[in-house]
Image: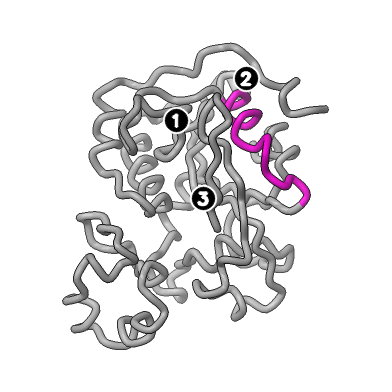
Amino acid sequence: MPLESQCCSSAAMPIDSGLLAAMSDQYAFCYCEENVFRAIELLSAARRDLRTFAVITSSFVAADPRLCFPGSWHRSCVVITTDRAGGTVAWDYHVFCVVLPPSGLRDAFVLDFDSALCLGGTPGRLRASAPFADYVALTFRQCDVATVRLRVVPGAEYLERFSSTRAHMLPVGLRRKWLQDPERRAQCPPGNLLGQVPPGCPPIVRLAEAGGVDLAQLINMHPDNRDVPGKVLSVAEFAAGAFQ
């Protein structure tokens, strides 16, 4: 069934404007994985009636996890339609949040800090949530659905296991030194993070021994990547709600 035929016209469940503002205040451009982490934190505390999911999308598949390092991520391409007029952006990966109310998928909605479907004209400032079916039908209509996959991680598990040193935002020449030298890491100026200012809060770092998983693991959609949380789905499976 074409994705467009699954699109519904029902409005997304509203979220209090104060909560939307609090999420937006923590936005950092090019750090979608952390924007979603903070949004799930806030939603989990304020709206216990809602189920949240972090959704990581990429087309990267590597049988050997060692081959999925930041310098190789350009091999992944997800073309996302960001507005109703058909404007697109190509990401190596992207992360957004799906929220599922007690009534189920028909009333589910999406929070995406980088999509005009959720924004009020200012990057990172959420105006409203987008109905799930509308978001999926519009967002993935120009991507290669044969290669794009979505890893859907329950919100609570994402909060427990997500880890990022932010090293993927460093130029390749600085990345190894930055990882090996804590003092250099602490002194690294924002300008070295590929020109993007990092979030004001500290990085979310968890050891692998404690269950931490980093972006390289999360964006690798290989079916044998079994130690990584979440279900890996095609666009059609995701649209049908196979993650519930």
Is residue 32 placed above or below 23 in the rendered structure?
below
Q: Nearer the viewer, residue 105 or 55?
A: 55
Compute the Cα span from label 2 to label 1: 21 Å
Q: CA distance from mark 3 to mark 2?
A: 24 Å
| Position of the N terminus by quadrant | top right
Number of residue marks: 3
- Residues marked 1 and 3 touching at CB (< 8 Å): no
Query: Along the polypeptide, which appears first: circle 1 or circle 3?
Result: 3
Please name the amino acid that badge 3 sits on: His
Residue 137 shown in magenta: yes
Q: Position of residue 80 (x, y in %)?
A: 58, 42
Does 116 appear in magenta?
Answer: no
The answer to whether marks 2 and 1 mark residues whose Cβ atoms lie closer than 8 Å is no
Of 144 and 222, the residue lying toward us? 144
For the magenta stretch, what is the residue range? 132-146
Looking at the picture, which amino acid does disc 1 mark? Ala
How far across and how far down the image is residue 88, in percent?
A: 55, 40
Disc 2 residue type (three-letter): Arg
Report which quarter residue 81 is drawn in.
Answer: top right
Q: Residues within 10 Å of mark 2 (few under 14, many from 20)?
A: some
Q: Which residue bears the numbered disc 2?
A: 106
| Spot occupied by residue 189 in the image (x, y as percentages of width and height) | 19, 70
Relative to 197, residue 186 above or below? below
Residue at image point 36% right, 40% down? 39
Q: Give the structural element (helix, strand or loop) at label 1.
A: loop
* Residue 94: image tag: 3
Residue drawn at x 60%, y 12% is 9
In this orientation, which residue lies closer to the viewer: 38 or 3?
A: 3
Residue 116's tag is 1
Q: Quadrant of residue 103?
A: top right
Residue found 51% across the figure and 29% down from its top? 83
**Of the image marks 2 and 1, the number of the one nearer the N terminus:** 2
